[in-house]
Structure formats: structure tokens, C-alpha cells
Image (cartoon, grey):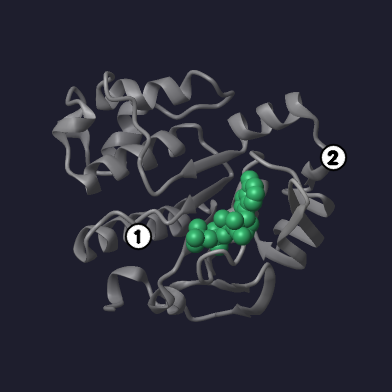
């Protein structure tokens, strides 16, 4: 199977005054194209740091990071901007929608900055929000706001969708439906989806499961028979 992401011997250190923090400590792994991937680990394990580097928002101190055949660790500012715009969709725990723009406008805004956007209305219909186009974010529930954020990420038509604790602010039922949406997007579109979570109960749903601890990979597992999110109770 084709490789989407290859990380080799990657380190990310942060220097704060005299102190050096090693957030990511010599990690290596590969994720196949189209894999639904979960990164698990306790607080401070380095999960967001890995996601931010894959998303082109941060760069490694050393090591190599290849995404769909492009070595992004050597990218300068301009290349990283293009990469973020055209290759990556990002979904955060707190939806970060523009409060003074409608649902449709929030999604259109994202499609305006990239090369091959999808139609904003179509994407919103895909996430079940075609009836809410002219609402403002404050008029939506948390789960609906996260769906707008997912639609905004998808409208850019990215190859890789990165999700950092996407259900962290949602109740069980709403969180499950958001995860099911991400899972189905992965399975039907062939996009590589990476979900960072604290919730170990989600492990059986992943094609690829990465356990991080203290900046290192504690375990890396591939599962040929994952359980679809909608079928799992936790
Ligand atoms: N920009 C930064 N400057 C300094 N230290 C940082 C920075 N970003 C992350 N760190 C440190 O790196 C370590 C790993 O942080 P990271 O956010 O990647 O962990 P995490 O697994 O995502 O945790 P959480 O689940 O709490 O979000 C932590 O000790 C954190 O304080």
C-alpha cells in the first residue's frame, strides 16, 4: 500500500530560557494512504506536537517528515503556507469558527485560499448541515459547530485530515456522531485521517494505532479488522 506519511528519527525540542523540553524524542513511523489513524497518549506525551508538525504549523528540530512523497521538514515559510493551504485540513477541539460569519461563509472563506476547493454547499450537505447555511455559529450546538469546522477543513479538498481532540468538548452521543463522520469520510474518500485523542476506548476503530508516551512511540499497531466507529460503544 502507498505510504502517506513517513516520519524518520524526528526530534522536536523547545528551549525555554535555560531549560530544554524534548516534546518528541527520536520517533519513526509510517502511515499508509487512506488509513484511519489514532494517536493515543496521556497529557504531554507529544501528540499535538506531532500533529502540528504534520500540519505544517511547526517544524522538527531534526529528522525527516515526508508527506505524500514531499519532504516537508526542509520547507521554508512560503512552502509551508502552500502546504497548509492545499494539502492539509485541520480540525481542532474548539471549533474556531468566525462568529460574525454564517455557516456557509465560514466554509467559503476556507475554499477561497486553496487550489482545488470543493463546493461549500455540497460539503455542508455531506456533514448534514444543508438546512443551516445562513445560521451563525452561536445559533448551533457544539456538535453542529464541529461539523461546520469539519466541512471547512474538507472544503479545501485536502489529502490529509488532522484532528486534534475533535470530540474533547462534546458529550458522548454528539462526540460519537462526529467521530463516525470522520471515520466515514476516511473510508469513502480515501483521505488519510489522523485523530489525536486521550480516549483509549477508541483504539479498536483504527487501521493504525500509535501510542505515545514521554515523546516516544510506546506502541505502533496495525489492525486489518477495525470496528467501524458507529458500531462501537464505550
Ligand atoms: N511551543 C512550545 N513551547 C514549549 N514547550 C512546548 C511547546 N509545545 C509543546 N511543548 C511541551 O512539549 C510537551 C508535549 O506537548 P504536546 O502538547 O505535544 O503534548 P500532548 O500529548 O498533545 O498533550 P495534551 O494531550 O495535554 O494536549 C509538553 O511538555 C509541552 O509543555
**Mark 1 element type:** helix
Residue 97 quadrant: top left
For disc 1, the neighbor class at 10 Å (few under 14, some 14 to 19, many from 20) is many
Marker disc for residue 74: 2
Image spot of residue 234 (x, y percent): 28, 78
- Which is closer to the viewer, label 2 or label 1? 2
Residue at screen point 51% across, 71% down: 42
Label 2 packing within 10 angstroms: few (<14), some (14-19), many (20+): some
Work out whether residue 195 can be spotted. Answer: no
Image coordinates for residue 116, horizontal then vertical, percent? 55, 26
Looking at the image, is 142 positioned above or below residue 36?
above
Residue 12 in the image: x percent, y percent? Answer: 75, 54
Label ID, residue 24:
none
Which mark, by number, is residue 179? 1
Asked if residue 110 lies left or right of residue 10, the reply is left
Q: Residue at x 78, y 48 (%)?
A: 69
Evaluate whether residue 25 shows in this view.
yes
The picture quadrant for ligand 1 comes to bottom right
Ligand 1 has an atom within 8 Å of the beta carbon of the residue at disc 2: no
Q: Is residue 87 above or below residue 44?
A: above
Q: Secondary structure at mark 2?
A: helix
Q: Nearer the viewer, residue 12 or 217?
A: 12
Question: Compared to 28, does 145 lie above or below?
Answer: above
- Left or right of 150? Residue 135 is left
Residue that sits furthest to the front in the current view? 18
Q: CA distance from mark 2 to mark 1?
A: 33 Å
Apparent side of residue 173 relative to residue 104 in the rendered image (left or right): left
Find residue 68 and report its horizontal and vertical position in percent. 72, 48
Amino acid at each position: 500500500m502507498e505510504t502517506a506519511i513517513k516520519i524518520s528519527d524526528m526530534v522536536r525540542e523547545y528551549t525555554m530560557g535555560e531549560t530544554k523540553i524534548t516534546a518528541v524524542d527520536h520517533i519513526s513511523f509510517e502511515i499508509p494512504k487512506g488509513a484511519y489513524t489514532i494517536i493515543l497518549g496521556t497529557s504531554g506525551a507529544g501528540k499535538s506536537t506531532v500533529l502540528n508538525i504534520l500540519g505544517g504549523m511547526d517544524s522538527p528540530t531534526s529528522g525527516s517528515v515526508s508527506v505524500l512523497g514531499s519532504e516537508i521538514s526542509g520547507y521554508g515559510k512560503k512552502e509551508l503556507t502552500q502546504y497548509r493551504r492545499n494539502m492539509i485540513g485541520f480540525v481542532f477541539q474548539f471549533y474556531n469558527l468566525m462568529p460574525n460569519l454564517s455557516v456557509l461563509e465560514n466554509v467559503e472563506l476556507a475554499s477561497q485560499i486553496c487550489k482545488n476547493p470543493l463546493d461549500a454547499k455540497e460539503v455542508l450537505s455531506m456533514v448534514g448541515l444543508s438546512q443551516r447555511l445562513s445560521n451563525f455559529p452561536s445559533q448551533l450546538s457544539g456538535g453542529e459547530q464541529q461539523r461546520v469546522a469539519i466541512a471547512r477543513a474538507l472544503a479545501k479538498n485536502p489529502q490529509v485530515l488532522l484532528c486534534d481532540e475533535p470530540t474533547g468538548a462534546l458529550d458522548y452521543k454528539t462526540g460519537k456522531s462526529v467521530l463516525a463522520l470522520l471515520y466515514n469520510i476516511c473510508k469513502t474518500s480515501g483521505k488519510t485521517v489522523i485523530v489525536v485523542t486521550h480516549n483509549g476506548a477508541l483504539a479498536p476503530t483504527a487501521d493504525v494505532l500509535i501510542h505515545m508516551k514521554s515523546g516516544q512511540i510506546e506502541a505502533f499497531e496495525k489492525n486489518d479488522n477495525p470496528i467501524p466507529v458507529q458500531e462501537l460503544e464505550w
